[in-house]
Image: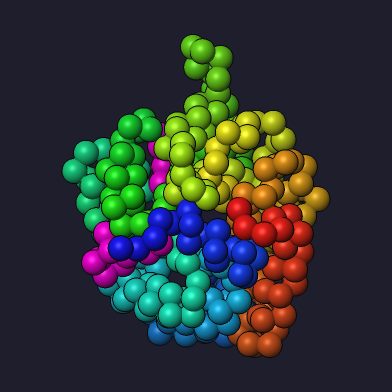
C-alpha cells in the first residue's frame, strides 16, 4: 500500500528541500530554447526540463494546459514527463485545477489519482468554487491511493478577490472557509495532512489564517512573478515551515543549457531552504 501523501511529502522535502519546480512549456519559452511550437518541440523541452529538475527537487509541477494544447501527442509527452520525474525520485504535482460535480469529478479523480491510471500522479490542484463538497470524490480517491490534493484558496490573480474575499454570513471570507474545510480534512494526520491549499506568494498578508491547516501550502509566484524570499516570509509568517514555493519561468528561462538550468535550480532551492528547515 502506498504511504500517505503527507508522509511522502515530508520525506521528500526533508531530503531535497521545499522547492516545487514548475515544468511549464509556454510557447515563448519554446521559442527561447530554439524549439518548434509543435509536439516534437514540446517533447524536447519538457523532457530536458524534467531530466535536469526532477533529480534536484522534491516536487515537480507540470502545467497540464500547456501539454493539452498539443492534443493527444501533448498528453503523451505529459505521460512521459510523469514517468521520468517519478523515476528520478521527485513527487509529481499536476496543475490541472479541475472542479466539477458528481460523476464528472469522480472521472477526473480516476484519471489522475487512481494508482492504475496512465496519468496517475502524486497530487493535483483542484478548484472548490462549485462548493467544497464537490471535491469529495477527489479527496476520497486520493486517500485510497495515497495521493494528495491542493485546493485553490487565495490566488494572486487580481480578478480573484471579488469571489475569494467575499464575506459569508458568519463573517469569514470564502477563501478562509476553504482553508477551514481543508483543515478539517487533515485532523489527526501524522506527520502532515494530505490536503493542502494554494495561496499566492504575491497576495496580502492576513488574507487567510493558515495556523490550523496542518497541511502543505503551495505558493506560486516565487521568482518570475515577482515574489522573493522576503515576500514569502511576509505573506506566510509562521507558516513557512509548511510551504512549497513554486518557481518555473525563473528557472526555465536558463535553458536549454543543462548546466545553466541546474545552476538556476540550485539558486532557487538554496534561497528557500532556510524557510522550512527539516520537513513540513
Q: Residue at 67% across / 50% down in the picture?
A: 241
Q: Is residue 93 positioned above or below 127 on the image?
A: below
Tell which residue pokes out farthest to the right in this image: 230
Say which of 219 and 78 sits in front.
219
Q: Is residue 102 magenta?
A: no
Say which of 74 and 203 sits in front.
203
Read off the magenta span: 114-129
Whole-percent x, y for residue 88 in the image: 49, 80
Whole-percent x, y for residue 227 in the image: 73, 52
Magenta-drawn stretch, dominant element (helix, strand or loop): loop
Hey, which quadrant is residue 68 in on the image?
bottom left
Whole-percent x, y for residue 263 in the image: 72, 80
Q: Is residue 45 positioned above or below 268 on the image?
A: below
Q: How is the image coloured?
A: rainbow
Instruction: Let me know if residue 187 appears in the view.
Output: yes
- The quarter of the picture where the N terminus appears is bottom left
Say which of 130 and 74 sits in front.
130
Q: Residue at 60% across / 76% down in the picture?
A: 56
Q: Is residue 115 magenta?
A: yes
Q: Is residue 165 positioned above or below 74 on the image?
A: above
Amino acid at each position: 500500500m502506498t504511504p500517505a501523501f503527507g508522509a511522502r511529502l515530508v520525506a521528500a522535502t526533508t531530503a531535497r528541500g521545499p522547492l516545487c519546480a514548475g515544468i511549464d512549456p509556454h510557447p515563448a519559452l519554446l521559442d527561447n530554447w530554439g524549439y518548434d511550437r509543435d509536439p516534437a518541440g514540446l517533447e524536447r523541452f519538457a523532457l530536458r526540463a524534467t531530466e535536469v529538475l526532477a533529480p534536484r527537487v522534491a516536487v515537480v509541477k507540470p502545467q497540464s494546459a500547456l501539454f493539452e494544447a498539443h492534443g493527444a501527442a501533448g498528453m503523451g509527452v505529459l505521460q512521459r514527463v510523469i514517468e521520468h520525474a517519478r523515476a528520478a525520485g521527485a513527487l509529481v504535482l499536476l496543475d490541472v485545477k479541475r472542479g466539477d460535480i458528481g460523476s464528472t469529478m469522480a472521472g477526473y479523480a480516476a484519471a489522475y489519482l487512481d494508482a492504475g491510471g496512465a496519468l496517475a500522479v502524486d497530487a493535483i490542484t483542484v478548484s472548490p468554487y462549485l462548493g467544497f463538497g464537490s471535491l469529495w470524490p477527489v479527496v476520497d480517491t486520493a486517500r485510497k491511493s495515497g495521493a494528495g490534493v491542493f485546493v485553490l484558496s487565495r490566488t494572486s490573480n487580481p480578478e480573484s478577490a471579488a469571489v475569494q474575499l467575499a464575506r459569508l454570513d458568519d463573517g469569514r471570507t470564502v477563501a478562509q472557509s476553504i482553508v477551514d474545510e481543508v483543515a478539517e480534512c487533515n485532523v489527526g494526520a501524522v506527520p502532515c495532512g494530505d490536503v493542502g491549499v494554494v495561496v499566492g506568494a504575491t497576495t496580502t498578508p492576513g488574507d487567510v489564517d493558515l495556523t490550523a491547516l496542518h497541511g502543505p501550502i503551495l505558493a506560486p509566484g516565487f521568482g518570475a512573478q515577482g515574489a522573493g524570499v522576503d515576500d514569502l516570509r511576509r505573506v506566510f509568517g509562521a507558516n513557512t515551515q509548511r510551504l512549497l514555493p513554486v518557481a518555473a519561468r525563473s528557472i526555465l528561462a536558463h535553458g536549454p543549457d543543462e548546466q545553466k538550468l541546474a545552476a538556476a535550480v540550485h539558486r532557487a532551492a538554496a534561497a528557500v531552504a532556510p524557510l522550512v528547515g527539516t520537513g513540513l
